[in-house]
Image (cartoon, coloured by chain):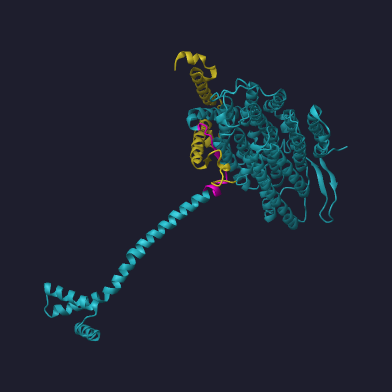
Chain colours: A yellow, B cyan
Amino acid sequence: MSDDTETEKDWVYRDSTKKLLMRLLLVGCVLSVLAELFVLDRKGKFGVDGFFGFYAFIGFVSCTIMIFVAKLLGLVLKVRPDYYEKNGKEGEQ
Amino acid sequence: MIWHPAFVLIFGALLVPLLGGKLRSLYVIALPMVALIAVALLPKGDHMTVSWLAGFGDLTLLRVDGYSKPFGYIFTINAIAAFVFAFHVKDSNQQVSSLFYIGSALGAVFAGDLITLYVFWEVMAVASTMLILARRSSRSMGAGFRYVLVHILGGLLFLAGIVITYNHSGTIAFDGFNPETDKHLGTWLILIGFLVNAAAPPFSAWLSDAYPEATVTGSVILSAYTTKTAVYALIRGYPGWDILITVGCFMALYGIVYALLENDMRRILAYSIINQVGFMVCAVGIGTAMCLDGAIAHAFCHIIYKSLLWMSAGAVLYRVGKSKCTDLGGLYKSMPLSLWLGCIGALAISAVPLTSGFTSKTIILAGAAYEHHFWPWFILEIASAGVFLHAGIKFPYFVFFAKDQGHKVEEAPRHMIWAMGILAFFCIALGLFPKPLYALLPNHGSYDFSAWKPEKVITQLQLLLLSALTFFVWIKWLKRTDTIVLDTDWFYRKGGPLLQRVVGKVLNGLNAVTYQGVIGRLVPRISSFAQSAPSRIFAAALVPIWVAQGIRGEALTAKREDFFNQSRLGAFAVGITACLGVLVLALLFFF
């Protein structure tokens, strides 16, 4: 992609902006985990949740699992938008 | 003097057709304001008791306590914002239906007995159907028809439950059913009736089917009342019923997965309602004072931020005329206020610290943890992360950013922005200063709770930031497709034919294998065995005799073959009897 088109694009869609935002997000993630060091007396309610970075871990892992479970279910559950309008084939009416 | 807030709206609605233009729009905004004042002035206790059939006890039209009053407040506050949002609406049918609907929802939460609750419950179902039909499209007609059928079923189950429960306990009072002693068919039927309205799977498809087909303003109003009235009814009637923990956790996860699959922005929000109601239902299942307060606080805040999100989506639909994510994108330039106000709703639903979702959802999570319910707590924490994924990021990202579809539209009308502004204010205000909300809760002060603990804020930020990171890491996998998603109808639309195919393959395959094995192989073998076995036995039995006679080697083989063939053909020189005689003699000779 040439620089001309890059600068013509709205700032939101520029690759440089996307990179910057992604870096900011990563910094935010790291800071949120490091901030846990300053809460010295953090105890888990169940033990396991008292481990350092537990919430960051389940945040990432559970969301990843949910995305892929949704993707897999999509193979079975997704249908064309006119599915219910199809006449005489599948669906109603 | 006591004014019933429900009657303020219902009787007030009767005057709507007599007014016109802006006066009518102002009048429908003023009505919920009067109802709000009426709620605020209600003294605690039972009022408006009416005697009806002898022996059935009095009907209590107005029961005011710590459970019903918070719902009264939020129902009326939200109604004010919703009617400001709907200021442009000229259709008096929608206005009257909305007032009946909100009025009957108020009637249901202030009902002190099962009969009053049932009557308002049914009025609510009919009035809400009108809001769906008001869009006057073939899709909304279909959706409205399906919606009313489901709610008639739910209402009938509820009614049957009331009859059986009355027969069982001899009272129509609507108090908590004891999870140990009150489990019988009647209470189970009432519970199913409530769960239908709460959109608990497998009775949930009506919500995602109907709400997105309602009018722009109709769906804003619908999003708040039916499910939350059901949540109120569950809080009142079924605290501590364990089954609700499972149901709630399932709803929380189900809503996320479906919202991730959806392409239509209003359907994403519809599934998100199910997810959020899941938190409340789970809290009711745990049933402690803290969890019940959490459910009420969360319902309160949820109504605000969910209406805000529906308004943001409604403003987009109003301006662009499209609601599919694949058709939207790049609207941040033309509708910046709708974006930012919608984002406040998105942050609140995600329970970001400083917003109302954080101060209310945290009560439920803390309540689950206090009771050492690990799995419900864990699932709700996961669901919290998932909410940010689908409602907090996916909705604003695909609607306002993503790929610029080149829609050149104006910002939402000023009254819509004002309505969103009112609700956004509450989202932030209740996040920063939750004490007035906590003070409304029925069990406030009976437990130790503070949302603003440093460790809770930090861990919540961790959860949400990593959830956001997940979204952008896997963004290619989240690419929108122009599809719709089947719900429980999958079982008969896809599952039925699939079952037919699988059963056909399995049974036909089994049939073929059986044919080949039994008819093709086993039967000929049995036949051959039946033909030759006696002859072979005879031949084998005679071999020792022949050996004793000195016959050996090839001669023996030839003799045996010859005997075998003769035996098969029945062509012995001597009869069978003589042969058997020889055999018997041989046996006598050897033994």
Drawn side of residue B508 relative to residue B362, left or right: left
Drawn side of residue B570 relative to residue B289, left or right: left
Q: Residue furthest front?
A: A87
Q: Answer yes or no: is residue B373 visible.
A: no
* In the image, residue B489 lies in the stretch drawn in magenta: yes
**Does B146 sit above or below residue B432?**
below
Q: Residue at x 55, y 31 (%)?
A: B389
**Does A71 sit above or below residue B434?**
below
Q: Residue at x 66, y 28 (%)?
A: B318
**Residues in magenta, as a range:** B478-494
Q: Position of residue A1 (x, y in %)?
A: 44, 17
Question: Where does the C terminus of chain B fall, quadrant-wise?
Answer: bottom left
Q: Residue furthest right?
A: B1
Q: Is B476 or B466 nearer to us in this picture?
A: B476
* In the image, residue B486 lies in the stretch drawn in magenta: yes
Q: Position of residue B568 (x, y in %)?
A: 24, 76
Q: Position of residue A62 (x, y in %)?
A: 51, 35
Question: Where does the N terminus of chain B fall, quadrant-wise?
Answer: top right
